[in-house]
Image (spheres, grey):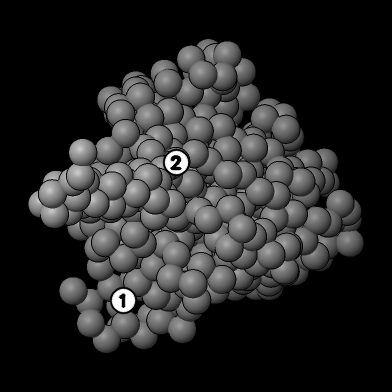
Amino acid sequence: MIDSPIGARRRSILAAGTAVAASPFMFNIARAQGAPIKIGFPVPLTGAFSAEAQDQVRAAEIAIKDFNAAGGFNGRMAELLVRDDKLNPGEAATRTLELIEKDKVQFIVGSLSAATQLSINAVARDRKVLFNSISQSDAINEAKDWSMYTFHEALNPHLTAGAVARYAFPRFGKRIVYLTADYAYGHEMVRGFERAGGPLGAVKLADIRHPLGAADYSAFLPRIQALKPDVLVMCNFGKDQVNAAKQVTDFGLKATMKVIAPILLLTARQAGGAEAFEGILGGSSYYWGLEDKVPAAKAFNDKFRKAYNGMVPTDYGALGYAGVRSVLQAVLNAKSTESMPVSIALRQLKYNWYKGEQSYRKCDHQSVQSVIIIESKSKNMKDKNDVFNVLAVEEANEANLRSCDELGHKIST
């Protein structure tokens, strides 16, 4: 039978439609709709901060599980791509570039060093990929390093040191010596203490600097003793903090001065032991013991214990959780995985993931949050994790941050 012109045209249209439906273009769209939402996570799995980094990964995976268990975004599940930045800015930049260009991640969360986070941010910013930093830094919020794609979930040195200074200096004395790790973190912490201490009448007797990764502090201790400070401030981190605390204790400095640290780490306390850290006071973004009074802390701790055989999360681990969960919540709020819509949603986010109410300041994307003042103990411990007394909580207050104008942001709304 010979086709009519109308019948032939109808079959031609149907065939064309079938071809379009099966085209690689349509297949790629369908595949993208079910593709995972990839979050790159560069942290120093090796090196002086490895214990803290490994806990960041554990907690970040809890945030991924939370998101996926709730159904993800339009059926798309989240995936964490962890990379070792080796605590090296060049390595951090290389791994970040690979995550963006090779692995095609949508977002970057991570870092555990003031230096590496700036290199990660530079790579992500230039490629318009959102980066949420989970390490302390003052510089990352300054206009010269900042962009609409830059967020800072962690405390910053100005806020942390300020809170500890406001608590400690009026109670223990105003003659201060700093033992400082000689890189951006240490320098920024000293600056934070000096700015907060000035109005309190604090006087810097010396800022004694040591290299990152130092094992021997014996050359510094006689000088500290001779200066006779009221307070010794250890502005260091990780294994540096463990080594310094042990040697300060062995040398007997605690008998004549109060020893404090801007960040008193759970991992460091557990590694160094009760005797080395006895009586040392410091600040923290989180301590698991808040669960007795803060429901969000209890919920977070319980999920972590269940996932990791009864372990409790650390301070920097909690930042890994919050950094990832905030980004994924912003994906849901923005109904997008594109960095700019997610950035806009993140700027508007009000959240309480694990310790109380938080939000990102719009001018610089710094998370406004509380600082917990803790002191190490060696007695009346309920279990091996019960190592700190919570002395005070400085509640979230934007006034404790450097101003937007000082940071170089002319528009603060």
179 up-or-down from 391: above or below = below
Along the polypeptide, which appears first: circle 2 or circle 1? Answer: 2
Q: Position of residue 87 (x, y in %)?
A: 72, 57
Q: Using the image as rendered, state which of residue 391 and residue 224 is in the foreground.
A: 391
Q: Nearer the viewer, mark 2 or mark 1?
A: 2
Where is residue 119 shown, x and y percent of the image?
A: 61, 70
Residue pointed to by mark 1? 403
Query: x%, y% of residue 76?
Result: 36, 37
The percent coordinates of residue 141 (x first, y second) are: 42, 71
Q: In the picture shown, does residue 366 fall above or below 404?
A: above
Is residue 150 visible in this depiction of the protein?
no
Q: Which mark is residue 384?
A: none
Task: From the viewer's perspective, tell me whether residue 125 is left or right of residue 98.
Answer: left
Viewer-side residue, 114 vs 66: 66
Dot 2 corresponds to which residue? 36
- Which residue is at a point 43% across and 70% down the rendered structure image? 128
Write down the quadrant of residue 223 in the picture. bottom right
Count the numbered circles shown.
2
Confirm whether residue 187 shows in the render: yes
- Tell me the kind of residue under disc 1: Ser
Mark 2 closeness class: few <14, some 14–19, many ≥20 residues within 10 Å: some
- The three-letter amino acid code for the residue at tag 2 is Pro
Residue 185 versus residue 406 in the image, above or below: above
